[in-house]
Image (cartoon, helix red, strand yellow):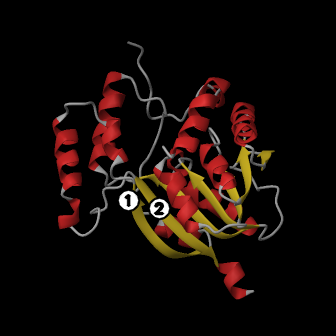
Amino acid sequence: MEDKNYSEPLTDYEWSMLYDSAQLDSIVRNILSGSLSAQSRELLRLSGEKDKILEIGCGSGATTAYLSKNGRLCTALDFQDKSLLLTRAVCQKLGCAVRTVKADARNTLPFEAFEFDIAFQAGLLEHFERAERVEMLRRWRPCCKKMVSLIPNAASLGYRMGKGLMEKNGTWIYGKEMPQYTLIKDFEEAGYSVTDEYTIGEKNSVNFLPKGHYLREAIERWLSEMELCGDNCGQGYLLVTIGENTVVNRA
């Protein structure tokens, strides 16, 4: 088995290998059948029809395509040509229009001030150290009225154990990934007023664990009785942080 270094982020080439046209049919099929990621469902809930939405780091394009199909006016940004090509192919097959922009999310974004009602990233900031996260959030802020972040939740037992097991057996494919308990201070330092923070996707967290694993069986049993707790006890595998652009609030 090849030794992998999980203390280093993926290279540009390694990121490009995660997305290709072979995924097209399965992405479209999942959207049409309603087999959606937790992040896609949550972004639809948080947005309204005709909202102008920017996805920073669009990956496969699945979330942007789903939002566009449901009446949102979407722009997808990524630094990888393969991601942008896949996003355009998904949208074309679904018959929805999405603007795609090639740009590096680590730099100032090529958009007008307050161009978007909502900008979001899902699965991007966890690959960067805190100072880098704050600087990226600060650079993104001028173009949006509201920022939504969705990253792995450090308090999710299913995700944390599953990630650890995959790193141990060499099957983890995302390189350096740093889940967080909160991003409130990051958002505030970058100039946002945090309006909410919570977790989603508790049912998805078990998918990181192998079938038959003791923790997977325990979490699945807990999920069947979760109503006894009154909430998901912070066990969603995604941490959702929502911030308002304070410059907009002062305007």
Residue 27 sits in quarter? top right
- Residue 221 relative to residue 178: left or right: left
The image shows residue 134, relative to residue 90, as above or below, that is: below
Q: In the shown orientation, is residue 236 left or right of residue 123?
A: left
**Residue 27 appears in the picture as rendered:** yes
Mark 2: which amino acid? Answer: Val
Give the left or right position of residue 185, taking residue 52 as reference: left
How far apart are the alpha carbons under marks 1 and 2?
Answer: 10 Å
Q: Residue 192: x, y in percent? A: 60, 73
Q: Which mark is residue 240?
A: 2
96 sits left or right of 229 in the view: right
Residue labelled with disc 1: 181
Q: Looking at this view, is 34 or 50 the one in front?
A: 34
- What kind of residue is marked 1? Tyr
- Placement of the N terminus among the 4 image quadrants: top left
**Closest to the observer: 212 or 101?**
212
Which residue corresponds to the image point at 16% horizontal and 45% vertical from the top-left? 218
